[in-house]
Amino acid sequence: MDNFGAAFETAFALILQLDSELVEIVALSLQVSLLAVACSALIGLPAGAVLAVVRFPGRQGVIVLLNALMGLPPVVAGLVIYLLLSRAGPLGEYGLLFTPTAMVIAQTVLVTPIVAALTRQTIEDLHSEYDEQLRSLGVRRTQSIWTLLWDGRYSLFTGLLAGFGRAIAEVGAVIIVGGNINHVTRVMTTTIALETSKGNLELALALGIILISLAILVNAAVMSLRGVTARANW
Amino acid sequence: MPFDASPRTRLTDRPSVLPLRLDAVALEAGRHTLIDSLNLELDRGPRTIIIGPNGAGKSLTLRLMHGLIKPTRGAVTWAGAAPGRRRRMRQAMVFQQPVLLRRSVAANVRYVLRVHGVARAERAARVADALERAGLAHLARRSARVLSGGEQQRLAIARAHAIQPEVLFLDEPTSNLDPAAALAVERMIDEIHAAGTKIVMTTHDMGQARRLADEIVFMHRGRLIERTPAAAFFADPQTQAARDFVAGQLLV
């Protein structure tokens, strides 16, 4: 168990030194995952809301598929994106493989189902409460979707946080499409995987501690936004 | 020269959506008949109070009139035309459980004004006016969802009235309120009626029906049993069911 004590010491040392390589890796991790969450929000929030409000044939199937995709294995998602972006693939001409952009795309694919599925659930509950009132007021369908998204905003934050948690912790997709290239596509999780395989368990564990602390910090920051926790359960 | 300059057809004077007619309106769910061949015509003026025991179909009747649900048979018409979004926007409805948006008190009123195309410059004054009438001006910035039950219902009524509807439907608006809060709601309804809005309201509170009604529509088991001016109804109900109901006996 010496590993753990030593790992905490190493972690503190790394943070206190503000090791430039560490800062670079942490910054890229945050940049990639936050961008992916933003992209997922742009797609998943409206898509989930439409799915909650509009009745169409096959809707139940889409919901089942969406819920299943929440558990999509990152490695599989990474592999599919890899094939799409590789030289021979349909999107090969853009030369995105092994760039941070590819990592954002892969994480967006992982996070969007989570955001959409949780949005669908939240908005469907809200819709059943608001539906008659909004129709009584003469609110049009598209307008009512924006109303529901706005009024559900505090609960929807929780969905985005869940998405961020998935993105920042995920290693399988980014290591395949990013390639873990030093100074280019190396993020926290891929570094931990690398250091573990090299046998630097102490350094890997220290990085893990920093990663978990970061996740806690981001969650705390969002939850401390005015009223998020208090109002999510309205 | 315009060939017709009568005040009735000026653009500023929108033609009335009343009278509201229900022709043999029925609502069935599976093999159950919830509303049975309802014939009724409502015009401007009197406050129409729909009373009857639970399950009589009072709320469904309001929803059918307002166009929130469609009858399975028969027709609802507003001034001879089928119900639609534009005609519905000349009406407003207040629900038994007020549905308030998760926003501030003022924002709830502002929202309906925006939906109804009220110019931005005009909104602030109309929001202030609506909240003043409801006695909620001091709570304008409070979250609507943390108001007391009475305040919530007053806000729902103020919001409905803010769009100056020709008809206001109220579905048991005071059934969850204590007497003082119910009285405040009744006062608002009176003021809205005095300002020229047709009131159609359901209640199972006989005292309230006596206080508010100009005419009574009595329903039982999805049927309209009788429609009588209020004074006559309470003095001398025409049907046995109504007599029992007024006398406070159980109707089954």
Image (cartoon, helix red, strand yellow):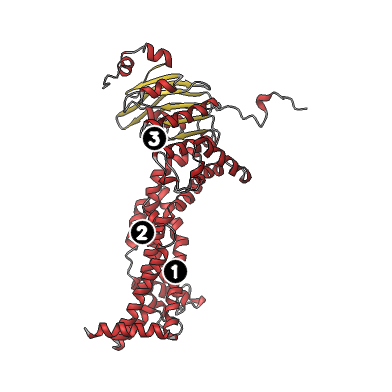
Question: What numbered label is drawn on residue A36?
Answer: 1
Question: In the picture shown, does residue A56 fall above or below A190?
Answer: above
Chain hosting mark 1: A
Q: Which residue occupies the foreground of this view, A143 or A154?
A: A154
Which amino acid does the dot numbered 2 rest on?
Answer: Leu
Q: Position of residue B228 (x, y in %)?
A: 42, 15
Real-space CA distance between mark 3 and mark 1, rounded to the nearest whole angstrom: 44 Å
Q: Are marks 2 and 1 on the same chain?
A: yes
Q: Position of residue A112 (x, y in %)?
A: 41, 63
**Chain under label 2?**
A
SS label for mark 3: loop
Q: x and y percent of residue B55 in the render?
A: 31, 28
How would you rate the neighbour count of disc 1 (Cα within 10 Å): few for under 14, some for 14-19, many for 20 or more?
many
For disc 2, the marked residue is A66
Q: Which residue is mark 3?
A: B96
Residue shown at 78%/27% (left/top)? Answer: B1
Q: Dividing the picture into quarters, in which one does residue A224 lie?
A: bottom left
